[in-house]
Image: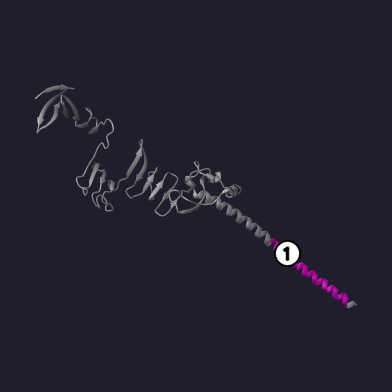
Amino acid sequence: MRQTQKEGSMRQTRKSAGVLAWVVVGLGVVVLGVPFVSAQTDVLYVVNNNVGIGIASPTHPLHALVSGTTDPVLMLEGANVTDSLSLKVQHPGAVIGFGLAGGAGAFFTTAAANDAVVYGQPGKNLLLGVGGSEWLRITSTGKVGINMTTPTHYLDVGVSGAYCNGGAWVDGSSREYKQGIRELSGEDAEEAFAKLSPVRFEYKAMPGEEHVGFIAEDVPDLVATPDRKGLSPMDVVAVLTKVVQEQKSSIEAKEARITTLEHRLDAQHGLLEQLAQKVASLEAEKTGKH
């Protein structure tokens, strides 16, 4: 047995069951390694209850230092396709798990064989984020929020009230989400309406399926999005609504004028009849005198 001194720990070399390995014990340090001729590669360190893989001074309960491309760094492999595997992180009040279903009903009753599964503690939320900020939340009741922390529908997006509850997409339209509210003038609506050019088209990703609509790059500025790549149906609906309201007001005004003219015409007809009767009476008197 050979003893060497390294970083204040005592190194002991031994041969066991035909496999060479170093076991180093000293000052709370255990190192397991693999020998290469006269050299040695240390691969596993246990220091103050922290385990290091490829790092001599681990600072976490399990600390791996990987040099170069290693994919995957951590691998759990089942011997059989029917094995259900999972990796859990938990404490007494909560858990998150990452699993691979070996058969139908594993983890969730709806899971199928070979489904990848992420699961959490019943009654708790699942959060995803970047840089210390939360960007997606799945509540314990199955509601999903993107950039919002209190989803109340199947999918809530942002803080402007847009959501989907399983049937249709709904744009947020409450006054509490808006500012700078002012009336859309009939002149602006008429101008935008005149520039809307409905077209028939097919999406390149879905050839053979025809749609009708507008080309985002061609619509008037009033209803265009900043990047001119999409359209909000509510913007177009607002323009159409205002145009229809203006036309309705115009039609009602014309109908009122027509009604007034009809009344005047009726009155004139009445006067003409009276005049005709008076003329007839005068002619009758004149004829009687002769």
Residue 25 visible in rendering: yes
> What segment carries the magenta color?
260-287
Q: Mark 1 sits on what residue?
A: 265
Q: Quadrant of residue 60?
A: top left
Question: Relative to 283, does residue 215 appear above or below in the rendering?
Answer: above
Question: Relative to 221, does residue 67 appear above or below in the rendering?
Answer: above
Left or right of 223: which side holds 270?
Answer: right
Q: Position of residue 157 (x, y in %)?
A: 41, 46
Q: Is residue 251 magenta?
A: no
Question: Relative to 288, does residue 40 appear above or below in the rendering?
Answer: above
- Towards the viewer: 97 or 83: 83
Q: Quadrant of residue 64?
A: top left
Residue at image x 90%, y 77%?
Answer: 289
Q: Kindly identify the amino acid type of the residue bearing the numbered disc 1.
A: Leu
Residue at image x 56%, y 45%?
Answer: 220
Q: Quadrant of the N terminus?
A: top left
- Towards the viewer: 277 or 115: 115
Residue at image x 40%, y 47%?
Answer: 156
Q: Quadrant of residue 160?
A: top left
